[in-house]
Amino acid sequence: MTTSVLNRIAVVMFMLFSASIILGSPASAEMISGQEAGIININDASLSELADLKGIGKVKAEAIIAYRKKNGKFESIDDINNVNGVGRKTIDKIRDRITVK
């Protein structure tokens, strides 16, 4: 292959990768964050990532982040129960979507 063809292939691959990031495809999100698809690390998750979890929302997500800043990282998933407003039922709803890596 000529250099010109290889350059064109590289440009196309870059454009496809960029488009997948812009469109938010799960594959690109996984490549960027290093997280398994759909699993959120509650020790470093953003406000929007936490808020998107079923039963959490913005207010509880803010409480989780405030607790994390004050007390440090969660050692287990069940430690999230210490956050004001997050109870057993909520934890049971999100248990398969969170981790504390």
Image (cartoon, helix red, strand yellow):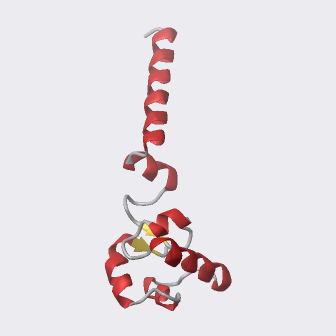
Residue 64 location (% of width, % of height): 55, 79
- Residue drawn at (50%, 55%) of the image: 33
- Residue drawn at (45%, 11%) of the image: 5
- Residue drawn at (45%, 50%) of the image: 29
Lateral position of residue 97 relative to residue 17, left or right: left
For residue 38, which quarter of the picture? bottom left
- Say if 30 sits above or below 98 in the image: above
- Say if 29 sits above or below 54 in the image: above
Residue 89 location (% of width, % of height): 34, 87
**Camera-side residue of 21 and 87:** 87
**Camera-side residue of 56 and 71:** 56
Count of numbered tags: 0
**Camera-side residue of 12 and 80:** 80
Residue 52 location (% of width, % of height): 43, 65
**Camera-side residue of 54 and 19:** 54
Residue 73 location (% of width, % of height): 59, 80
